[in-house]
Image (cartoon, rainbow, N blue to C red):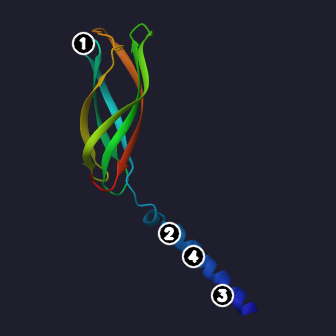
Amino acid sequence: MKSFASKVFAFFVFALLCAAAFPTAALARPTIKFHVEHVYLYEAGEAEIVGYFENTGDQGAFVKWMDLDLTLIADNGQQMWSDAGIRHYVDDIYVNPQEYVEYTYYVQNPDIPEYHGKYRFRFHTNTHWEKAAG
């Protein structure tokens, strides 16, 4: 019985060492996030969102859609406009691992002001991707 217990213990130690040595093989997957670089306001009701999709994972994937929470803040600190959960569907943009793809799109909302002064923006994005196109 002692021999069997020592073999089980040795196997358990070996399995732990293997799991510690090769953790990335089990976690290989894409990790894609949209980053906003700038927001342009040209006319009332429309904002141009300029940014990029970055894949920090170790597999490529296709971007399907993203949600954007966006807040525009005037130079004097007053909030000009804010909206959460702005969904934007993307036409299967492929992002290779450890690379990025530039992307620009437009948000339309009648409450977006026309503004030509200095302003800041805050954002949060949730990007949905899949490994297959279509």
Q: Secondary structure at mark 4?
A: helix
Give the spatial CA distance, label 3 vs label 1.
74 Å
Q: Give the label, 4 or 1, closer to the camera.
A: 1
Q: Position of residue 110 (x, y in %)?
A: 33, 14
- Give the quadrant of the N terminus: bottom right
Category of crowding for the residue at label 1, using alpha-carbon neighbours closer than 10 angstroms: few (below 14), some (14–19), many (at least 20): few
* Residue situated in front as seen by the camera: 89 or 122: 89
Disc 2 designates what residue? 21
Relative to 6, does residue 96 appear above or below in the rendering? above
Disc 3 designates what residue? 7
Category of crowding for the residue at label 3, using alpha-carbon neighbours closer than 10 angstroms: few (below 14), some (14–19), many (at least 20): few
* Residue situated in front as seen by the camera: 97 or 20: 97
* Residue 15, numbered label: 4
The mark that comes first in sequence, 2 or 1, is 2
Disc 1 designates what residue? 43
Question: Does the CB distance between marks 2 and 4 fall below 8 Å?
Answer: no
